[in-house]
Amino acid sequence: MSGGASTPASLSLGSIRLRKLPARAQIVVFPMILSLLMSGIVSTIATLRAAGLDAEIVPKILQSWILSYAVAFPTALVVMPVVRRIVSLLVDMPRS
């Protein structure tokens, strides 16, 4: 491209092209994905330990995960600023 025109950033998933979210969305998307992954991992481990490996384990894990995520995501949104502040106290950040 010439002339300095910019096109919106996009993500290709096979034949599907999605526009990327703006940078300001990171404040919600980061804790959303982090809490989704962490609640899924923790719920799976806790459910396997409590219920064992049986024929109904997948629905049990999913039920546990839904409840865990319903708590984890809002919690992550609330505590993220506190975590950033603690990290800034502990880590020497480069000055720009």
Image (cartoon, rainbow, N blue to C red):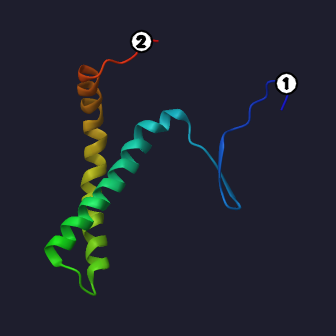
- What residue is rendered at 79% in x and 24% in y? 4
Instruction: Tell me if residue 85 comes above or below residue 14 in the rendering.
Output: above
Q: Could you tell me the amino acid type at mark 2?
A: Arg
First along the sequence among labels 1 and 2 = 1
- x 31%, y 50%: residue: 73
Q: Which is nearer the eye, 77 or 48?
A: 48
Q: Which residue is mark 1?
A: 3
Q: Which residue is mark 2?
A: 95
Q: Which dot, 1 or 2, sits closer to the camera?
A: 2
> Extreme top residue here?
95
Quick check: 53 above or below 45? below
Is 43 situated left or right of 4 in this image? Answer: left
Instruction: Judge from the rendering whether residue 34 lies leftward or rightward of residue 63; answer left or right.
Output: right
Q: Quadrant of residue 68?
A: bottom left
Q: Residues within 10 Å of mark 1 (few under 14, many from 20)?
A: few
Quadrant assignment for the N terminus? top right
**Residue that protrudes farthest toward the left in the picture:** 50
Disc 2 secondary structure class: loop
State the residue at coordinates (25%, 76%): 60
The mark found on residue 19 in the picture is none
- Secondary structure beneath dot 1 equals loop
Q: Amino acid at mark 1?
A: Gly
Q: Residue at x 16, y 71 (%)?
A: 49
How far from the left and from the top, in percent, is residue 6?
74, 31
Extreme residue toward the bottom, this view: 55
